[in-house]
């Protein structure tokens, strides 16, 4: 079945509903707060409706597989914006590919520059795996800066931010540039470290009162009213309420990859769960219900029992991203519905909504390196402005970005080939935080 894995990788399962006794009271407290606020009846109503909706949603995904992910042309988005049909489809599936975001000649040179930068600084480049790093802890190589600050990248990000809406009057669509890493993954390198997960925090989605307000309709028995693109309610969510190296302080409207080389299914691509609304609703409701003992009844949502007192949040730990698995989240039918993205060429970008479940391709059976720069779209919010200011101060004084600074000794200013922000446009300087 093209688009899905031929065999499910050994990604961790989160199935200990009955024998898991967390010692940390914050889990039970988050649950109690929500049960007190919304009540069993509303949560049950939502649970049944979301599981019912997922039947048709998962049927459609397993039928269309990678073909459900829209593939658009960057020129058209930049010139005319998204058509109404494109915008509504992106809001529905939560992800898309933009072809030719960065011109081929620019991206080819950027990739060669990256290889040179890594070769020239080999002794000092850190990453995973330790001996021959391919997931690189580099944040300000000339390649990353060129790709992040490219005029087309910034204009596309403005369009992406505008898919969200916000009642306030400030200019939230203006992009801010978040510094993240880069990858140059060789063929044959398996990677099981990033199974199905959702970023932007984990327990904080339930525990932070502002954050859980973003899911109020889901928790109050009206999941069909959930608006996954409401920036006004989401902009103040505390993604780092519980600190962890996996959590970004910034709010990313869409996470993204900019391809420096080809990336294809089973060749180091990314896998996405192409749905936002029902899938995140299911993840939010799942800790309140315990599965039936009879495995044959698991897919019958009405057989699940309300779990008022248990403190089991499957796949949730404080410092890590929200994890998902086949056994803990059965109605998502991950094996059929976590699909490879359509093949990308160098210069293409892929984008997924901040609540979309994704996983890194566990295998790379291609013949060439698969290289991507992690470049997200971040709107201008108070939380983001404050982080970007801090990030710029760090960059200019030779420290890693704040989200990646824990335990990392790195001063890229002294790397051979480092050019910093020399020559970037005024538009890019604004996005880098120079005028905040
Ligand atoms: Fe991720």
Image (spheres, rainbow, N blue to C red):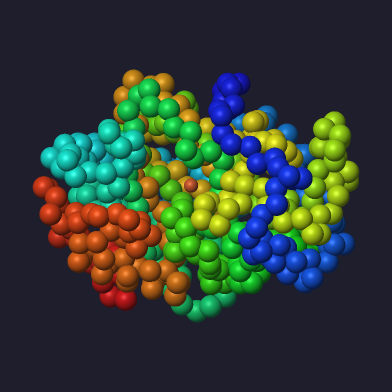
User: Which residue shows up at 77% across the image and 71% down it?
Assistant: 37
Q: Is residue 116 left or right of residue 204?
A: left
User: Which residue shows up at 33% across the image and 48% down it?
Assistant: 181
Q: Is residue 374 left or right of residue 361?
A: left
Residue 100 in percent (x, y) is at 36, 41
Q: From what the image shows, is residue 272 above or below residue 25?
A: above
User: Which residue shows up at 65% across the image and 30% down it?
Assistant: 336
Q: Quadrant of residue 264?
A: top left
Q: From what the image shows, is residue 339 above or below residue 152?
A: above
Number of residue marks: 0
Q: From what the image shows, is residue 394 above or below residue 281?
A: below
Q: Between residue 399 and residue 153, name the one nearer to us.
A: 399
**Quadrant showing the C terminus:** bottom left
Residue 267 in percent (x, y) is at 42, 26
Q: Between residue 196 and residue 30, name the one nearer to us.
A: 30
**Residue 1 seen anywhere in this rendered image of the structure:** yes
**Quadrant showing the N terminus:** top right
Which residue occupies the extreme bottom position in the image?
169
Residue 234 in percent (x, y) is at 57, 67
**Residue 100 seen anywhere in this rendered image of the structure:** no
User: Which residue shows up at 17% across the image and 40% down it?
Assistant: 123
Residue 313 in percent (x, y) is at 68, 52
Q: Between residue 315 and residue 342, name the one nearer to us.
A: 315
Q: Quadrant of residue 404?
A: bottom left
């Amino acid at each position: 079945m093209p688009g899905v894995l031929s065999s499910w990788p050994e990604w961790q399962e989160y199935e200990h509903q009955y024998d898991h006794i967390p010692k940390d009271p914050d889990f039970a407290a988050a649950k109690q707060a929500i049960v007190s606020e919304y009540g069993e009846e509303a949560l049950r109503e939502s649970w049944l409706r979301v599981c019912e909706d997922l039947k048709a949603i998962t049927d459609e995904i397993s039928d269309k597989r990678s073909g459900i992910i829209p593939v658009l042309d960057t020129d058209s988005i930049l010139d005319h914006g998204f058509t109404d049909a494109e915008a509504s489809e992106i809001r529905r599936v939560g992800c898309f590919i933009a072809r030719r975001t960065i011109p081929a000649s620019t991206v080819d040179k950027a990739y060669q520059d990256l290889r040179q930068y890594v070769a020239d600084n080999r002794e000092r480049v850190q990453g995973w795996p330790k001996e021959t790093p391919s997931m690189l802890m580099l944040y300000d190589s000339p390649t990353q800066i060129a790709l992040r600050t490219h005029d087309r990248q910034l204009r596309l990000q403005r369009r992406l931010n505008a898919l969200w809406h916000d009642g306030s009057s400030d200019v939230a669509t203006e992009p801010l540039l978040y510094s993240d890493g880069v990858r140059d993954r060789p063929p044959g390198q398996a990677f099981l470290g990033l199974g199905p997960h959702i970023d932007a925090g984990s327990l904080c989605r339930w525990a932070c009162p502002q954050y859980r307000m973003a899911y109020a309709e889901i928790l109050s028995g009206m999941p069909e009213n959930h608006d996954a693109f409401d920036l006004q309610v989401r902009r103040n969510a505390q993604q780092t309420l519980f600190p962890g190296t996996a959590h970004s302080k910034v709010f990313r409207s869409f996470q993204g990859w900019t391809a420096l080389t080809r990336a294809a299914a089973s060749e180091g691509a990314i896998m996405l769960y192409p749905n936002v609304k029902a899938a995140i609703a299911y993840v939010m409701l799942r800790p309140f219900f315990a599965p039936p003992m009879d495995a044959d009844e698991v897919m019958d949502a009405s057989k699940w029992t309300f779990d008022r007192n248990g403190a089991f949040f499957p796949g949730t730990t404080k410092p890590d991203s929200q994890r998902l698995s086949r056994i803990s989240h059965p109605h998502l039918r991950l094996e059929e519905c976590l699909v490879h993205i359509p093949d990308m060429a160098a210069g293409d970008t892929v984008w997924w909504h901040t609540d979309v479940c994704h996983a890194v391709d566990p295998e790379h059976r291609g013949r060439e390196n698969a290289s991507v720069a992690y470049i997200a779209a971040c709107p201008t919010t108070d939380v983001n402005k404050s982080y970007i200011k801090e990030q710029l101060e760090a960059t200019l004084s030779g420290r890693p970005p704040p989200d990646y600074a824990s335990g990392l000794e790195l001063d890229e200013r002294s790397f051979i080939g480092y050019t910093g922000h020399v020559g970037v446009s005024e538009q890019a300087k604004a996005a880098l935080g120079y005028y905040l």
